[in-house]
Image (spheres, coloured by chain):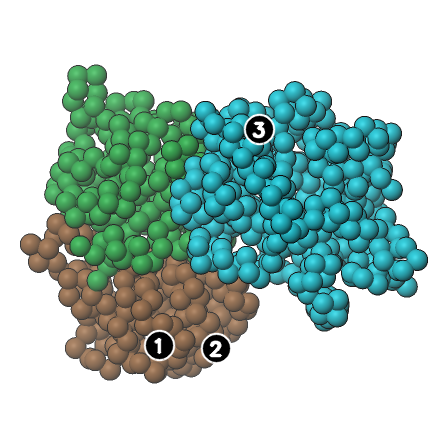
Amino acid sequence: MTKICTRCILDTTVSDIWFDDKGECKYCMINDEMEKNHPLGSGSEARLQVLIEKIKKDGKNKAYDCIVGSSGGRDSTYTLLKAVELGLRPLAVHFDNGWNTEISVKNIKRACEKLKIPLYTVVADWEEFKDLQVSFLKSSTPDADIPTDYAIYSVLFKVAAKEGVKYILNGHSFRTEGTSPISWTYMDARYLKAVHQTYGKIKKIKSFPVLSLSKLLYYSFVKGIRDIRILEYMDYNKKEVDQILKAKLDWEYYGGHHHENVYTKFFQSYYLPQRFNIDKRKTELSALIRHGQISREEALREINSSPYEYDPTVVEYAKSKLGLSDEEFNKIMNDPIKSHNDYPTYLPLIKTLKWPIKMATRLKVLPYILYLKYASN
Amino acid sequence: MIVIVDYGMGNLRSVYNKLKRIECDAKISSDPEVISKAEKIILPGVGHFKNAMEKIKEYGLFELLNQKVLKDKIPVLGICLGVQLFTKKSEEGDVEGLGWIDAETVRFSIPEHQKIRLKVPSVGWNSVSLVKTDSLLFKGIDPQELFYFVHSYHLKSTNSSIVLGTSNYSYEFISCIEKDNIFGTQFHPEKSQDQGMQLFKNFVKM
Amino acid sequence: MIRPRVIPILLLKNLGLVKSVRFKNYNYIGDPINAVKIFNDLRADELVFLDIMASKEKRTIQLSFIERVGDECNMPFSVGGGIRTINDIKTILSAGAEKVIINSYAAENPEFIKNAAMEFGSSTIVASIDVKNNFFGKEATYTMGGTKSTGYNPVDFAKLMEEKGAGELIINSIEKDGTMEGYDLDLVKRISEAVTIPVIACGGAGTYEHMANCFKDSFASAVAAGSMFVYHGPRKAVLINYPAKNELLQIFSN
């Protein structure tokens, strides 16, 4: 029997979930903590201004004062727009993992042209990236999308360091996307390496960076590069943002969360629901419920009325592009399920370093969400 | 079952792929037994008219095709060289065709002063002006859509009843025909994006 | 009336897409099948695939690759790279390509073009001519990725290819390649004036204006571009792009 949170719609398909005596879930609690830390209102505007001034000051004699990762999706495009409107001089950075769609490419191009922002891309060697993606599919964990996420993360830090820029503007917002449950998505460098070494064929990845923990710490503490979730300082309404982006940047919607990338479309609409019974729409809808952008009833209706619809041609395309035979694909879809706990990760270390991490978040060197999600219980 | 006739010439795979995409039961075959069971036939073609006619005879398909198309009257779609083969004869090789339509195949005759701009073969995307505007073959296709042409020869006829549509390349020429069960396009629907797919869908539905 | 074609040129090296400058410094662009998918969605007129290592490595493009492109591609595509026999052509056309592009072997053995045109029809045979100034500053035709001089003068070679039955010519300016500063308008014009078959201009496209001029002043039947359709901006970000329908009409409307 699936138990559903009484406030949002996350349920026991999230294996690390727990509920308090009101029936509200762990992720509602995390949301409330985040809200306490980052309240909206005139306070947040003032804090945003201070931050913007600092970014401008630190970037004064440089070509750019911040880096913005751009995928052509709603969040990253809105981040670019806001950055420019707030008077910053961003460098847009795109990581090409070989799965771009015509819409994502068009959106990136139009945004950069209209906002007059320079664009820099890192293109993964397809054979290398394919090898990494396939190893994650073979790992039997739900984390088969983290190669892209981790690569983007690494690329942004590396480019920031190279350009002498201290600020990475991140389009994530706990208010509209929600925090992805750790049992649904887990990533760290040790985990990535372990899975790749176990199932991959290519020994060393050369065409894109995969930051080690020590490198990440170096960039954060020594180089002082900060990852800022700028949209968390603003009141962000999804539907309104869509209109704004369309009007100002000729932005086009691609029909699903992160569906601007074909692999993510395959992953979220087919792989996760079919294999793991994970429906990522629940995290996004839950976030919108908590922030009054949709009612719980509407959200439940949406989830219950239609299973996550997938396009069989996308599945066929993914299979063919990844070079998987029917047999290999069937094995991937039916092998016993595992989790990140079955592989070496930094999670035990993170849990041990709970208090130093909390301090680092208080000092704003690391985002607070990192502590809440990984280090706390 | 639709048979894409393989007489050794033509981009069969492209046609087959497009039919597969619209979930049509199609087969590529040069086997007379298979062709004799076809409910519809597609005759693609790229290359030399004379070679094509020789190959059709060599493969033993000449009589069979006549039987299926003229006697059994099954729908047939000729593409590019394919539709040219339906004509009585061609200037290319000075050879007789299948003679299913009252037309002949002639080489583009471009006036001297236009030759610098209008090269032959004519290659590219061109519009089709429909004469038979209620044709089932073009159902649901926006008249502004372009189709992909690549040819040095085109159809010519004094018999306007067979003309389905015309296109312009220095002058108007017949770019598609329709006569009872016989259809043909000078352009390549299998290379003409969504509008080409729609044309195949329409042919399959007939 | 036929609108001039605008054709992305995709160079393949070890099954990855690459882009050069002056036929050197090949930069990795990405997975070619994904590029096909995007150009499909952007409704490109045609695609050209050239395997740049094929002649040197004495082979043609991998058949399974051509088949995959054929399965994905909704518009015509041409394939070039190491083609030397009638069977090579047969295999490539059967795999779904519309036309084949012959460069090195066309100069080595022009009779081959004649045989190929007779077997498959002129319209499937495209001769590709790479041009740059030789050591003495004189315009010459090169093969093997711009490394081997053929001794032919480009206009004469173009005429020879037409005579042998080639259905189209791709004229590639090595010096302009990857520079995005404009086509070699004079070269393209002289060749267009010398032959009655379509000429596809390549090498140097950077803007739609370059393309419009090439069509208007140099009588190109089609304009091809590499860098312009895969790069964006001063930092040469890799971003596949192609003009929209209305932009295409605008380019050639004057």
The residue singled out by tag 3 in the image is: A166
Task: Identify the residue at horizontal 24%, vertical 37% (top origin).
Answer: C182
Front: mark 3 or 2: 3
The green-tinted chain is: C
**Residue in the foreground of this view, choosing between C98 and B98:** C98
Determine whether the residue tagged by mark 1 lies in a helix, strand or loop: strand
**Residue in the foreground of this view, choosing between B202 and A41:** A41
Determine whether the residue tagged by mark 2 lies in a helix, strand or loop: helix
Q: Residues within 10 Å of mark 3 (few under 14, many from 20)?
A: many
Task: Identify the residue at horizontal 44%, vertical 28% (top origin).
Answer: A63
The residue singled out by tag 1 in the image is: B182
The residue singled out by tag 2 in the image is: B205
Q: Residue A267 appears at what percent x and percent y?
A: 67, 51
Q: Residue A262 appears at what percent x and percent y?
A: 58, 50
Dot 1: chain letter: B
Task: Identify the residue at horizontal 89%, vertical 55% (top origin).
Answer: A19
Taking the image as shown, residue C152 lies to the left or right of residue A190, namely: left
Per the model, the C-alpha gap separating discs 1 and 3 is: 70 Å
Image quadrant for the C terminus of chain A? top right
Amino acid type, residue under disc 3 in the picture: Lys
Q: Does A17 appear above or below B185?
A: above
| Chain B, colour shown | brown
Amino acid type, residue under disc 2 in the picture: Lys
* Whether labels 2 and 1 share one chain: yes
Amino acid type, residue under disc 1 in the picture: Ile
The cyan-tinted chain is: A
Per the model, the C-alpha gap separating discs 2 and 1 is: 15 Å
Q: In this view, which residue lies farthest toward the top?
A: C135
Dot 3: chain letter: A
Task: Identify the residue at horizontal 79%, vertical 58% (top origin).
Answer: A10
Label 3 with label 2: CB-CB less than 8 Å: no
**Picture quarter containing residue B123?**
bottom left
